[in-house]
């Protein structure tokens, strides 16, 4: 049996009862986090253009485009929802393996809605899809340490602007990060012109050596601010907020629901926010996944 057949056999044979309870709970958290990004990202210009194009293409009314509420073919709905979820780049991501949580959560949701499956079956699909994606990414080995000690990796974007600029001007985390109003703000333009980033070779080598040798425990990083009068403020850390490696940085359920509320409050009513969060965190007892899709549609109308 080849690798593809082995993976396909594993996916088709796995049942909900085979998955540990803690993994199912993580799947619920993934769903809630991805929904936060999709709903929050629905107002971005890139997502709006993509949704407009997909609406014009038509399609069988099989699945729902979140927030916008119209139904189209399952592939079109999955694409539109993934496009919205990727707009903020604030979704869960395995370290250095790319943003693929939304590609596990949202295509599965479109197909689950079309097939009228239960919440437990949907969670199983999410868990399998996420696991599958990670295994393929790990096999790709797009990061490696060369014999001379240098680090070779695939080209990735630099997301420091999403962290530094909002913090300096006091912008709340979430959809405002990518709004035209925010990025055209004079204060943001001024900060953008003065921020410089560079790779610390020592941190970089330690980071990727640990990543390739086993379970990664640290994410070394440093921020330095130099004021006009010559003062320097610097902070170096080993873990970032949201990192599950430490109790101090792990985003627990309460904090995750807080993120969901913050990302969606401009789109959903308070009642809809509570209903979606409650439904997602109890998905294994939901007989029909359309329940929380309807909450989103009604709450954003």
Image (tube, rainbow, N blue to C red):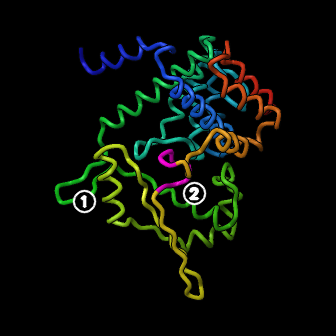
- Residue occupying the point 32% across, 51% down: 210
The picture places residue 300, in percent across and down from the top left corner, at: 78, 33
Kindly identify which numbered label has been placed on residue 150. 1
In this view, the residue in front, 125 or 39, is 125
In this view, the residue in front, 194 or 147, is 147
- Residue occupying the point 37% across, 16% down: 10
Magenta stretch: dominant secondary structure: loop
Q: Quadrant of the C terminus?
A: top right
Q: Is residue 275 above or below residue 256?
A: above
Residue 195, magenta (yes or no): no
**Looking at the image, do the residues carrying marks 2 and 1 touch, with CB atoms under 8 Å apart?**
no
The residue most toward the bottom is 229
Residue 241, magenta (yes or no): yes
- Residue occupying the point 56% across, 52% down: 248
The picture places residue 51, in percent across and down from the top left corner, at: 64, 34
For label 1, the SS is loop
Label 1 crowd bin: few (<14), some (14–19), many (20+), radius 10 Å: few
Q: Is residue 198 above or below residue 296?
A: below
Disc with the residue nearer the chain's start (2 vs 1): 1
The picture places residue 5, in percent across and down from the top left corner, at: 30, 15
Magenta segment: 239-246
Q: Is residue 206 left or right of residue 1?
A: right
Q: Nearer the viewer, mark 2 or mark 1?
A: 1
The residue beneath circle 2 is: 162
Label 2 crowd bin: few (<14), some (14–19), many (20+), radius 10 Å: some
The picture places residue 58, in percent across and down from the top left corner, at: 64, 22
Q: Quadrant of the N terminus?
A: top left
For label 2, the SS is helix
Can residue 36 be seen?
A: yes
Q: Is residue 169 left or right of residue 301?
A: left
**Distance CA(mark 2)–CA(mark 1):** 27 Å
Kindly identify which numbered label has been placed on residue 228. none
């Amino acid at each position: 049996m080849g690798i593809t057949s082995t993976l396909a056999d594993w996916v088709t044979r796995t049942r909900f009862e085979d998955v540990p309870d803690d993994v199912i709970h993580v799947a619920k958290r993934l769903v809630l986090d991805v929904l936060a990004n999709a709903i929050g990202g629905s107002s971005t210009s890139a997502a709006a253009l993509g949704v407009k194009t997909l609406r014009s293409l038509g399609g069988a009314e099989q699945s729902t485009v979140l927030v916008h509420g119209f139904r189209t073919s399952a592939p079109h709905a999955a694409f539109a929802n993934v496009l919205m979820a990727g707009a903020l780049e604030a979704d869960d991501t395995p370290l250095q393996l790319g943003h693929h949580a939304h590609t596990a959560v949202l295509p599965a949701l479109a197909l689950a809605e079309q097939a009228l499956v239960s919440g437990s079956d949907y969670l199983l699909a999410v868990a399998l899809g996420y696991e599958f994606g990670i295994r393929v990414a790990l096999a790709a080995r797009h990061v490696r340490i060369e014999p001379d000690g240098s680090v070779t990796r695939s080209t990735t974007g630099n997301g420091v602007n999403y962290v530094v600029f909002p913090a300096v001007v006091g912008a709340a985390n979430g959809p405002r990060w990518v709004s035209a109003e925010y990025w055209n703000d004079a204060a943001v333009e001024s900060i953008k012109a003065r921020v410089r980033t560079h790779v610390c070779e020592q941190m970089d080598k330690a980071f990727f050596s640990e990543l390739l040798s086993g379970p990664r425990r640290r994410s070394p990083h440093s921020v330095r601010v130099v004021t006009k009068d010559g003062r320097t403020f610097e902070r170096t850390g080993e873990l970032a907020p949201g990192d599950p490696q430490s109790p101090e940085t792990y985003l627990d359920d309460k904090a995750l629901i807080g993120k969901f509320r913050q990302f969606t409050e401009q789109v959903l009513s308070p009642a809809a926010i509570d209903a979606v969060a409650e439904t997602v965190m109890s998905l294994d007892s939901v007989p029909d996944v359309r329940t929380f899709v309807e909450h989103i549609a009604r709450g954003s109308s």
